[in-house]
Amino acid sequence: MSLSTQYKSLKDKVVFITGGAGGIGASMVKAFRAQGAKVAFIDSNKEMAEALITDLSPLSDNTLWYKTVDVTDSIALQESIYQAVTHFGGLDVLVNNVGNDHRQDIENISAYDWHKCMQVNLDPAFFAAQAAYKTMKKNSTGSIINFSSINALIGLQHMTGYVTAKAGLIGMTKALSKEFGEHNIRVNAIVPGWVATERQLSTWLTSKEEQKWTESMALKKRILPEDVANLALFLASNDSALITGQGIVIDGGRT
């Protein structure tokens, strides 16, 4: 990955990323490693995680940690953070990236479906932040980055649960920035547009849908996982030291 900026403040920092095996998550794992950071990541897809680790093998050392975790299990999620803290001796950056943009007709959403959507797209961000806070406040520093979506701002059909969860993440970001601010812990949200990950290109982001989406953008370019990773690097670095409680949109001018 070619980087335009090298952040000296990220070297040797400990970064924990949820949903780090593929898509935007994998791009962030690579980006933070390229900055000289120590990266811990979790994912439920062990096969994808192992493929990523193999891809990073030329950099093989004690700066990469992984565990297979189902983030809907809040106890297992928090325990994985504590284990990563023990392994690396601290925690400087938490990236709450995990999510699932499952589509469903409004009339067919059961109570189980609704709660399952929140358990994947909303709840893990809180419980991960709660666990990270316990370590970060000891050092009076830290950066927590939540992942929302511009769907929370514009709304889309067949995605009511996902849209609701992503809107909740914006509110949670505001609340936690006030809760954690006295310990110099910053909390921000990245609010991306439609990112052209392999999964999106193989499912929802068809040529027809991409053309329609691009027509509504000011910048007629695909948003790539690397573009989002670059924003995460900035929000994790000391260069964004006075930015907190914000939802920063990266959508090529779609909104």
Image (cartoon, rainbow, N blue to C red):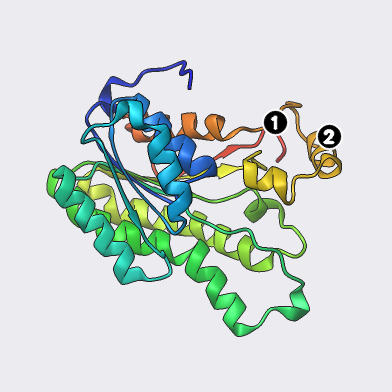
Q: Which quadrant of the structure image shows residue 105? A: bottom right
SS of the residue at dot 2?
Answer: helix
Q: Which quadrant of the structure image shows residue 157? A: bottom right
Is residue 3 in view from this perspective? Answer: yes
Direction bottom: furthest residue: 111
- CB under 8 Å between callouts 1 and 2? no
Compared to residue 157, the image places residue 32 above or below, namely above
**Residue in the picture at 28% in, 26% down:** 36
Residue at image mark 2: 215
Query: Which of the pair 86/152 is nearer the observer?
Result: 86
Type of amino acid at the residue the image marks with label 2: Glu
> Residue 250, position in %: x, y?
59, 36
Compared to residue 185, the image places residue 36 above or below, namely above
> Residue 186, position in %: x, y?
33, 43
**Residue in the picture at 56% in, 58% down:** 166
Task: Say which mark, if any, is on residue 222.
Answer: 1
SS of the residue at dot 1?
Answer: loop
* Badge 2: residue crowd in 10 Å (few <14, some 14–19, many ≥20): few
Is residue 247 in view from this perspective? Answer: no
**Residue in the picture at 31% in, 27% down:** 59
* Badge 1: residue crowd in 10 Å (few <14, some 14–19, many ≥20): some
State which quarter of the image contains the C terminus.
top right
> Residue 222, position in %: x, y?
70, 31
Type of amino acid at the residue the image marks with label 1: Arg
Query: Which of the pair 50/125 is nearer the observer?
Result: 50
Query: Which of the pair 202/205 is nearer the observer?
Result: 202
In primary-sequence order, the first of circles 1 and 2 is 2
Query: Which of the pair 185/72 is nearer the observer?
Result: 72
> Residue 14, position in %: x, y?
25, 39
